[in-house]
Amino acid sequence: MSSPNWTDYSYPSTEGLEEINVIMHVTHAESNASTEEDQHNIFIHPTLSAYYQNLTPFIALSMFVGSLLVLLNIAIFSHTVSKIRNSCDPCTRVPSIIMCSLYPIICGAAFTTIMLPKGWLVCHTVMHICFTIGAVVFRQLCFRYVGSELTYAKENDGAAVAISTPPCCCCCLCLPALMPSKTKLCLLRYMVWQMPIVQGCIMLVLNLIYYREKDLYHSVNMYFIPFLVSSILIGIWALNIVVRMVNSIHSEYGLMKKMFCLQLILLLCKLQYMLLDTQLNHIELGGYYPINHTIYKQTIINLLILVEMVLVSLLVQNAYKSPPV
């Protein structure tokens, strides 16, 4: 066997080693610069481990207070359910319980945002969908109070119903009053039903974009807003017409108070959320990564929602626990 010829093997030159070292140094410097930039970005969400390893007294106290508020809301809900089971008819019992369950669910979503900051969009979507599902169930509950849509049409005896109701009251002043019929009641039903379908699809797409490509989400999310707003306006308008139709014949069911409780979900969890999210950006909160401005801002907003949902739950208890007079 012939011995290996060591002269056949080449070794990297000194210049090649220097080039490799330069490339590694540049890559390392870029990586450090990127990490430092992330740490000084007040709008980035920290990892779960970094979040819990650097808890501040305010965040820890917010977690404790939030857990107490969630338990309080569940206790109020349980008490309301016991009242509903004792006072409501079997046909209205389940929809009434579903309507009351929206508020502890929203409390749970707000508390989850405090515990898992990166999941804020999923939790916000839960609050959003709670309103749309509540609108569908409440429309069904309105007609169950009077028996059915057919029963309402007979009791109404052809009386016209004004359609200049919020949120489209200013746009519908020139439109004639609505004469209830099977076709028009069906149209109102579809106008309400489109909300959970349209809103659910849009929010699902936004969640997929956000958790796969955050930069793309910030570029395109504004284009979805007109569709979200249009869908909500159409659904609320139709629901308000239905509520006023039934309330004009049976005001003893307190539908206006119950409708107000449902609309508070939209006002507090959507409009208030957006306003506070914008306004708190003008105030310096927190420090740098990981417990930065975004963490403090989200915690304050969701803690406020937790307190408000407890108060709204008490209002809901008053609206649903008593049988119609």
Image (tube, grey):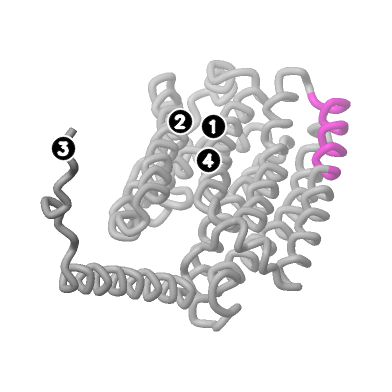
Q: CA distance from mark 4 to mark 3?
A: 79 Å
Which residue is denoted by mark 2 in the rendering? 193
Question: x%, y% of residue 183?
Answer: 38, 21
Amino acid type at mark 2: Trp
Callout 2: SS: helix
Amino acid type at mark 4: Ile
| Labels 4 and 3: the sequence-earlier one | 3
User: Label 2: how many residues lie within 10 Å, few (<14), some (14-19) or many (20+)?
Assistant: many
Amino acid type at mark 3: Ser
Nearest the eye: 2 or 246 = 2
Which residue is denoted by mark 3 in the rendering? 2
The disc at residue 136 is 1
Nearest the eye: 83 or 49 = 49
User: Label 4: how many residues lie within 10 Å, few (<14), some (14-19) or many (20+)?
Assistant: many
On the picture, is 121 further left or further right than 103? left
Question: x%, y% of residue 3?
Answer: 18, 42
Q: Of tags 4 and 2, which is closer to the observer?
A: 4
Which residue is denoted by mark 4 in the rendering? 129
